[in-house]
Amino acid sequence: MSDRNAYETLGLDEASSFEEVQAARQRLVKECAADPQRKEAVEAAYDAILMERLRMRQEGKIKVPDRIRYAEKQAELAAAKPTLPTVPNRSPDWLQDWLDTPSRNDILWPTATYLGLSVLTWFTATPDGTGTSVMLGFGVALCVYFLNRKEHKFWRSVLLSAGGLIAGLLLGFGSVSLLTSQGIAVTAAQVSAIASIVTFALMWFVSSFLR
């Protein structure tokens, strides 16, 4: 079955999201419960779309949700094992909409980037904070880039990055206050460096685990 015919069978097009593909498949399977031949065609169309999107994911053309990245292996396991009762997902829908299950590359690149920025910030920090401000600017821009690459929602990426910057600076300066309250001497350059590094850590979390 060609990809175009598969989409037509489900009443969709290639721009349809995976959730729409799933919903169409479930609806059509129920509708044709008394027609085994049509039901088989619906299942075959769904499998064809699934395999095509997995192939495109491997080629880096699209980002496919984690739950279908290894769908072919999951299908083999399902056939080999008896069906077990599933535990319902108790996480709120709004939380699932914001959280991401990152791939290795989704974590690796932000990790390397923010680690490099943290090292540079520590060694180039100045008392007036000029160097750290430049590094923070790079950090925010990279956070927007990493987030926007996932879902292609620019303004949402900007909002999350700005939130990460503000929260990171609050945590960073709070950490400095905690150090000074313990009698640990901290120079002006180190204050801005510590606050920036804590901010980079939070931006890494935002860019890796949110979407």
Image: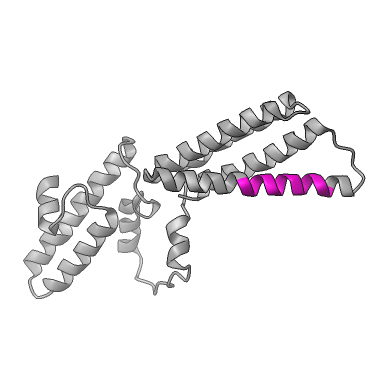
Whether 207 is drawn above or below 36: the answer is above
Pick whichever, 82 or 198, lies toward us. 198
Report the number of numbered marks: 0
**Residue 109 in sight here:** no
Pick whichever, 97 or 37, lies toward us. 97
Residue drawn 30% across the image and 62% down it: 79
Q: Reply yes or no: does residue 172 show up in magenta.
A: yes
Residue drawn 67% across the image and 44% down it: 169
Residue drawn 20% across the image and 63% down it: 25
Whether 18 is drawn above or below 114: the answer is below
- Please indicate whether residue 2 sits to the left or right of residue 47 in the image: left
- Please indicate whether residue 179 sits to the left or right of residue 144 in the image: right
Pick whichever, 115 or 6, lies toward us. 115
Find the residue positioned furthest to the top.
124
Where residue 58 sits in the image (x, y, percent)? 33, 38
Whether 185 is drawn above or below 6: the answer is above
Where residue 147 sits in the image (x, y, percent)? 46, 43
**Residue 189 in sight here:** yes
Which residues are drawn in magenta? 166-178
Hey, which quadrant is residue 140 in on the image? top right
Pick whichever, 109 or 146, lies toward us. 146
Colouring used for the render: one colour
Q: Reply yes or no: does residue 86 show up in magenta.
A: no
Where residue 208 sits in the image (x, y, percent)? 52, 45
Whether 28 is drawn above or below 49: the answer is below
Residue drawn 48% across the image and 43% down it: 158
Where residue 17 sits in the image (x, y, percent)? 27, 53
- Please indicate whether residue 120 sits to the left or right of residue 57 in the image: right
- Please indicate whether residue 163 sits to the left or right of residue 26 in the image: right
